[in-house]
Structure formats: C-alpha cells, structure tokens
Image (cartoon, rainbow, N blue to C red):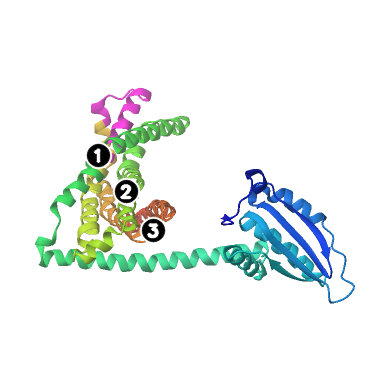
C-alpha cells in the first residue's frame, strides 16, 4: 500500500474514499479522494460502474483522472482507476492522469502494463483426449524413473566396488546407526503384523476347508504362504513405509538445507556418506526381519490352530515338518536382499531429487513409498513365477 507523503489531512478524510466528476471546458475530470485500497474496493467498484460518460461530441474532448486527493492507494485501487480510464478510452475519450506522485505513477503504470497483457487461452480437452494425455504422461514418467533408478543403481554398485579397494571409506558408525533404526527398531511392529496375519490366514483357511472336511490342511496353507509369500511381502511393505520414507525425508531435508552441497564443497562424497550405509544396512536388516516375520506368522497360525482345531504345539510342529521343507523357506528368504536394495535405492534417490520446498519433500516421500511398494510386489510376482517354473 502506498501513502502520499507530506500531506496534512484529517484521519477521517484519509480513510474516506470517494470521487466526483465535473466537466471543465472540454475536459471531463474524475477527482478521486481518500483511500483507494482493497478495504474500500467493493464500494468504489459499485459507484464507478454506475458512472456514465456521454460520448464526446468532438475529438477535442479529453478525460482526466485527478488523483492528487488520494491519500493511500494499493493495487486494487490502481486497477479500478485503470479500468475506468480504459472504459473512457474505449468510448473515444482520451484520458490522462494528473496529480500523481512518482510512487503512484509507477504503480498505475505497472497495473496498466499487466492489465493489457494477453491472457493465455485455456485449452479445453475432451475426456478421451485427457485420458490419452494422462496415460502418455504416466508412461513417460515411468520410463524416466526406470532410467534414473538404473543410473542410481550403477552409482551405488560403483560405490560398493570402491569400498573393496578403499575399505577406509566405509562409514561404520552410520551403518550401525541405520541397522539399528531400520532393523532392530522395526522388530516389534513387523512381529505383531505377521503374528496377526498368520492367525487370520489360519482361521479363514479352517472356515473355507471345513465344508470339505479338510481342516487339517489349513496348516499346510499357512506354512507355505508364510514362508514363501506373506513373511517377505509384509515385511518388505512395512519396511518400505517405515524406513524407505525415512531415508527420503532425511536426505531430502539435508538437500533442502543445502547440507549436501556443503558436503561436496568440503570434498565429502554424499554417496559414501549418505547412500551406501543405508543400502548396506537395509540389505543386512531385511533378511533378518523376514526370518522374524516367518517365525511369527507360523506362531500366529499355531495359536489359531490350537483355538479352532484343538492341535497342541507338538502336533502343529509335526504337521509343519510334513508340509514344508527347506526350499520353501529359501524361496522367501532369497527375495529379501533384492527387496532391500529396491527399497533403499528408491528412498535415497527420491531424497536426492527433493528441491527447496516442504511441498517437494512431501511429494517425494509419498512417491518413494508408492514406488517402493509397487516394485516390491512386482519383484515378488517375478520371483514367484520364476521359482514355480524351475520347480522350487
């Protein structure tokens, strides 16, 4: 808001907006007074719309906006003046401003320039074209993400190989820290989830098999599902939502505060310091968490088997021995390191892509979780088909 300098007016006069019009010779004048600000814009707008200027009988008539009496003005007031002047010009009345200070003149000229700028035309697309465009954008984005993830995997692989040649670059403290946060502190929630899911699968299996008199085979179903699919899939999804998002948030916050740029300036490689400890820690932690998830899934199934089938623990364990063997256990465990690499890579990569705003951080954290879970499910499906194809 601009105020007129060196003007002695009463406060009530300064805050009372208004105008009057007069015809002086061949000049049609609008004399504005008071405060032309957004607070008074509605009343001024109504009054100005009611103002009618007769079409000048000859080209000698001119218009004048006398704003010497305006004490305060902001963008809304300048726009009202400019709109009125443009209406006079359209009716053939050449209009000029009088009594403007330098600051007022600059504001009015800026509003006039912005107001005369042509607005971009909004292209309205049909629903079919919009669907096609959205699909094309999604495919393009997926292809770009695949290329970026492959490139990032190459950088991580090069960093791991560099550790074999220069072991002193390995950040032991950071590795242990992330092993604790991503592994040990995730044990309670993963154990609880797998316990409950194992119990639910056993209960539903008994319900569905009861009409066929095959309730004991629910133990086989729980054992195979827990070891091959449920244990690794639930664990990986929980880790993606818990640790993958944490990786993105931590690295993204450092990127926002320009700490990563400062590290590069000091000669510290962010790949060695931030990315490799997280990737390696998750590669170690996820198989251990998967093993815990498998055990808790079987335990949950055993608790429910005792409740609905009346099996004691020794009988339940004997049935587990009959239903599964070591290859079922390994079919689930072999997926864990690959899932860990995917989760850590996506989390760290999205963190590196964060820009300098909180909105960007939130967007990339969400993107990291969604992409990690999607890729983990795709990985599980590929492994399941491959292992079934080779008879494992």
216 relative position to 39: left or right: left
Camera-side residue of 26 and 147: 26
* Label 2, label 1: how far apart the Cα atoms are: 13 Å
**Between disc 3 and disc 2, whose residue precedes?**
2
**Between disc 2 and disc 1, whose residue precedes?**
1
Residue 236 placement (x, y as % from top left): 32, 47
Please identify the quarter of the rendering in which residue 235 is found. top left
> For the view shown, which residue lies furthest in the right direction?
57
Q: Which residue in the structure is indicated by mark 3?
A: 356
Region in magenta: 292-316
197 relative position to 46: left or right: left
**Quarter of the image where the N terminus is located:** bottom right
146 relative position to 93: left or right: left
Q: Which residue in the structure is indicated by mark 1?
A: 185
Q: Which residue in the structure is indicated by mark 2?
A: 246
* Label 1, label 3: how far apart the Cα atoms are: 30 Å
Badge 3: residue crowd in 10 Å (few <14, some 14–19, many ≥20): some
């Amino acid at each position: 808001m601009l105020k007129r300098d060196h003007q002695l007016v009463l406060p009530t006069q300064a805050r009372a907006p208004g105008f009057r019009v007069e015809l002086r010779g061949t000049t049609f004048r609008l004399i504005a007074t008071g405060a032309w600000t957004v607070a008074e814009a509605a009343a001024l707008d109504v009054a100005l719309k009611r103002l009618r200027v007769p079409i000048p009988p000859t080209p000698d008539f001119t218009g004048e906006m006398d704003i010497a009496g305006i004490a305060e003005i902001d963008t809304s007031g300048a726009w009202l003046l400019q709109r009125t002047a443009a209406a006079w010009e359209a009716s053939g009345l050449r209009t000029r401003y009088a009594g403007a200070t330098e600051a007022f003149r600059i504001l009015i000229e800026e509003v006039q320039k912005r107001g005369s700028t042509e607005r971009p035309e909004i292209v309205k697309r049909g629903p079919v074209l919009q669907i096609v465009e959205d699909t094309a954008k999604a495919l393009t984005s997926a292809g770009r993400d695949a290329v970026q993830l492959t490139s990032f995997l190459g950088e991580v692989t090069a960093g791991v190989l560099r550790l074999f040649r220069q072991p002193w670059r390995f950040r032991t403290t950071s590795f242990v820290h992330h092993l604790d946060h991503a592994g040990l502190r995730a044990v309670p929630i993963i154990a609880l989830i797998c316990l409950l899911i194992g119990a639910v699968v056993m209960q539903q299996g008994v319900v569905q098999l009861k009409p066929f008199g095959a309730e004991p085979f629910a133990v086989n179903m729980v054992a195979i599902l827990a070891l091959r699919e449920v244990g690794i899939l639930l664990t990986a999804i929980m880790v993606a939502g818990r640790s993958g998002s944490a990786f993105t948030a931590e690295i993204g916050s450092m990127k926002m505060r320009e700490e990563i740029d400062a590290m590069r300036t000091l000669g510290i490689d962010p790949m060695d310091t931030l990315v490799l400890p997280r990737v390696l820690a998750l590669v170690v932690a996820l198989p251990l968490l998967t093993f815990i998830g498998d055990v808790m899934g079987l335990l949950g199934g055993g608790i429910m088997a005792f409740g609905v089938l009346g099996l004691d623990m020794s009988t339940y364990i004997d049935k587990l021995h009959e239903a599964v063997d070591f290859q079922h256990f390994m079919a689930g465990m072999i997926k864990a390191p690959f899932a860990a690499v995917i989760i850590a890579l996506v989390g760290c990569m999205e963190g590196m892509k964060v820009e300098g705003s909180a909105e960007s951080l939130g967007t990339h954290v969400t993107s990291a979780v969604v992409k990690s879970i999607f890729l983990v499910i795709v990985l599980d499906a590929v492994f399941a088909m491959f292992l079934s194809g080779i008879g494992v």
